[in-house]
Amino acid sequence: MDLVFKDGKTNAHFQIICENEDFDRLYFTRNKEDKLLTIAWNRGKTQKITIDEIVYNFPVNAILPLMTNQSFRFEDSETIVAWQFNRDFYCIIDHDQEISCVGFLFYGSSETMFILPNEKETEKITALLHVFKDEFETDDTIQGEMLRLLLARLIITVTRLAKQQYIAP
């Protein structure tokens, strides 16, 4: 199931990919024009993910931020939930260094960050996913704004987790 929001006036693009057996992003061969940031969540068992031709273990329930220029493919993409968006949809460059599209989540670490939410955070993200899906059923002139707010909440939640796990106290 792919849920897609596009605004032709601003070139804003946001989508949620769920249960898609063909989901990948091959930046250098197929998707070079799409400048999409990705937050991928592994809802299945531990699996392999290949990022720029390097194979990693993608732990169960882990969340992984991926850059616009990274190629990736999953061993079992049907168990992945992915939020993808471009800068025209969401980027708070002038407002906040931590949660913008050039903030900590996407540029805060030189290593690949596999972020592991605890049970409480997993429940929050699951509930947020339901709200996202519900919002895609609401077709009105302010749908894009609501989706941006929900995405900001997701980014804040995942950024907090990433900082706890990747920045020494």
Image: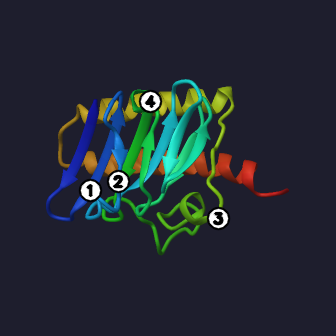
Q: Earlier in the sequence, mark 3 or mark 1?
A: 1
C-alpha separation, residue under disc 4 versus residue under disc 2: 16 Å
**Marks 2 and 1: CB-CB under 8 Å?**
yes
Residue kind at label 1, given as amino acid type? Arg
Q: Which mark is residue 30?
A: 1
Q: Secondary structure at mark 4?
A: loop
Residue kind at label 3, given as amino acid type? Ser
Q: Earlier in the sequence, mark 3 or mark 2?
A: 2
Which of 40/74 is in front?
A: 74
C-alpha separation, residue under disc 1 versus residue under disc 4: 20 Å
Residue at x 47%, y 51% (from the top left corner): 152
Residue 18 screen position, x and y as percent: 36, 31
How many numbered marks are there?
Answer: 4
Residue behind mark 3: 110
Q: Residues within 10 Å of mark 2 (few under 14, many from 20)?
A: some
Q: Residues within 10 Å of mark 1 (few under 14, many from 20)?
A: few
Residue kind at label 2, given as amino acid type? Leu
